[in-house]
Amino acid sequence: VIGRAFSPRRAKKKFVITGRVKRLYVVFFLVMTGISALCAATPWAVLPALWPLALPLGVALSGLLAWPIEKAISECYFRDARRKLLSNPRLVRIGITGSYGKTSVKHILGAILSEKYPTLITPASFNTPMGVTRAIREKLTPSHQVFVGEMGARHVGDIKEMCRLVHPTIGIITSVGPQHLETFKTIERVASTKYELIEALPAEGSHAYFYDDGAYVRKMYDRTQKPKTLCGRAPATCDCWCDEVSVSAEGSRFMLHIRGAGSVECHTRLLGEHNIQNILLAAAVASDLGLTLRQIAHGVEKLAPIKHRLELLSHPGNFTIINDAFNSNPVGAKAALEVLRGFPARRIIITPGMVELGEREAEYNREFGREMAACVDIAIIVGKNRALPIIEGLKEAGFPEGNIHRVDSLDDSTRLLHSLVRPTDTVLYENDLPDHYQEA
């Protein structure tokens, strides 16, 4: 309490004591009360003086004792959400997973489907069992005709658990890449976990959608025996594709083709060619669910930038901000740099680098630095350990050392930016910049 009252720092997010933490406080109070009573009844009454040293063990014991309670509460909510989902037999249930792109595809699909159907998508980045459970219990109504659930994973079996909740009849895999390698260890295990979504689809009345990456996702498509659709850039092999692509700082134009349905010209304000990939997946699903090409194009036209994902903002100082601060991965970072390169100089990047990439994290960040050199004029790198390989990559690519700045915190980067930025500059925030960036 004293620390919070006198701390001069203001956190980016308001401190919230959740119901789960409140229950943990109650259990901890009971544990410490029991220990106090035990010590008072023995010659060891001096032991309470040593309690501050044992507090971590006390909290761990309390957490262990509270776990069955929390598990029972979670399972109760989980079953209630599943019952609510399955109580409407006409509800189309869609699951989306992938190493990256799943949140974008979810929002794009929700916007397009809303041209015809009352559609509920899980909000923000709710992609855990309890997050999706909460969304269903609080937001799903009998009037909804489509439910779109984002499915995240950090461990093998996580997608299977999500499917136990949602029971999807449509599955979409956006990508497979080096995300969460600290827990998955290998990309092969990432791919296997993502494919749990397709395995969970019923044998009849289901449909699987894939983007042709020429690698892991394409292999998933080839092995799938259930009804399936492939999206990509190759008309010869894909069921949904695009051509005549034009990408600029104002968005993208392209011709959308859906086999059996026809073609339509589309325009979107979303930045980056990679967002066209996301639109193709959403358009393929929408077409199969009965939307016309005109409805699809109209939905694409109305798409708004997704918060913290290449979100274009205007700063009061007249410079432009590209907010891509939700998270970052090697493919997404490269796409963000390509978007930045489409803006006139000067171009500034602020980033702490990429995290959760396992043993190859330094290698990926070094390559990030090399790619950065051709796309930015000033680089502001936040942190220490992960900053070093990025700076090495910048120098290897011949980037001027005088334009490389390393700072320790978000506040430092903000102060430095304000001393450097000009009204006509474009600033890319790539990956999150927490209050205390954790160095591994």
Image: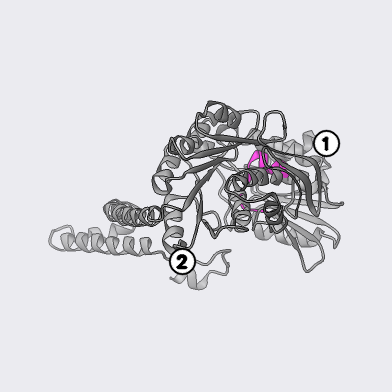
Q: Quadrant of residue 212?
A: top right
Q: Residues within 10 Å of mark 1 (few under 14, many from 20)?
A: few
Whether 300 is drawn above or below 364: the answer is below
Q: Please provide the residue range marked out in magenta.
A: 324-335
At x 56% / y 65%, what residue is drawn?
Answer: 11
* Residue 416, visible in the rendered structure: yes
- Relative placement, left or right, of 250 versus 412 is right
Instruction: Indicate the quadrant containing the N terminus: top left, top right, bottom left or bottom right.
Output: bottom left
Mark number, residue 398: 1
| Image position of 295 (left or right of 210) | right
Label 2 crowd (10 A; few <14 / some 14-19 / many >=20)? few
Q: Is residue 114 left or right of residue 373?
A: left
Residue drawn at x 72%, y 35% as measured from the top left: 233
Residue 84, image quadrant: bottom left
Under mark 1, the amino acid is: Gly
Q: Earlier in the sequence, mark 2 or mark 1?
A: 2
Name the residue: 65% across, 48% down. Answer: 352
Rendered location of residue 159, percent (x, y) = 45, 41
Position of residue 43 relative to residue 193, above or below, is below
Q: Is disc 2 placed on a helix, strand or loop?
A: loop
Q: Residue tagged by mark 2?
A: 16
Label 2 – label 1 distance at C-alpha = 46 Å
x and y percentages locating residue 247 in the rendered image: 80, 46
